[in-house]
Amino acid sequence: NAGTVADIYISVYGERGDTGSRQLLRSQKSKKFLKGQTDIFAVEAVHLGHLYKIVIGHNGLGSGNGWFLDKVVIKDPTTDLDYTFLCHRWLDHGQDDGSIARELIVTDASTFPGRQELELKIEETWAAEKWKFQRGNALQFYNKLTRGFICLSPDSRVDALGDKKNKYGKVFFMWMCA
């Protein structure tokens, strides 16, 4: 039940504007939006320059209107560039977060110079810092305004009273305590 019978709408955003909301009407397949199927649509629009996001959703009508969207790939015939927008989520009132529309940001390295370097830096930072987020640790932040601590506990409790006599000290801006 990952396909949908609802009407699908998309808005494409680029550096020169957007398409406005467009219904995806004619797929190259006889039945559109079926589970496991790739549908291809032609959307006429002025050239938007480099694309950076889309908003895609449906009208929620029809039985079985929930839809699991893997990704959207837009091929720009003017520049011969492909823009990929990953979703991998439900657009369904009864699934995931209940949203039937998603805003997706482009994921292509070709449209974001330096993206690979940024992703590598993020991976390196996470490798160095992930120990702080292990089970049983509590994350604390020192609040300079109240001169106290805000503690995020493993059980999702937040102590935001700013206890000035916290047993873990007052020196560091952020650290983990067992």
Image (cartoon, helix red, strand yellow):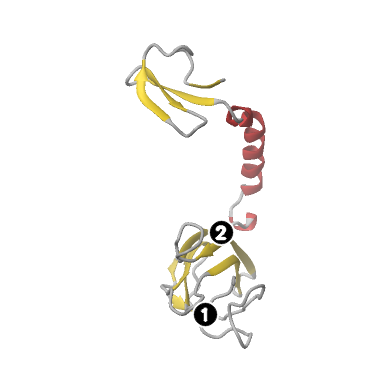
Q: Is residue 47 above or below residue 108?
A: below
Q: Residue 61, percent across and down? A: 43, 78
* Residue highlighted by disc 2: 106
Snapshot quadrant of residue 176: top right
Which secondary structure, mark 2? loop
Q: Earlier in the sequence, mark 2 or mark 1?
A: 1
* Residue highlighted by disc 1: 5
Q: What is the quadrant of the N terminus in the image?
A: bottom right
Residue 50 visible at all = no
Q: Is residue 115 above or below residue 178?
A: below
Q: Residue 86, percent across and down? A: 59, 60
Camera-nearest residue between 105 and 37: 37
Residue 44 visible at all = yes
Residue kind at label 2, given as amino acid type: Val
Q: Residue at horizontal 52%, vertical 25%? A: 138
Camera-nearest residue between 41 and 92: 92
Residue kind at label 1, given as amino acid type: Val
Q: What is the quadrant of the C terminus in the image?
A: top right
Snapshot quadrant of residue 31: bottom right
Snapshot quadrant of residue 157: top left
Q: Is residue 128 left or right of residue 147?
A: right
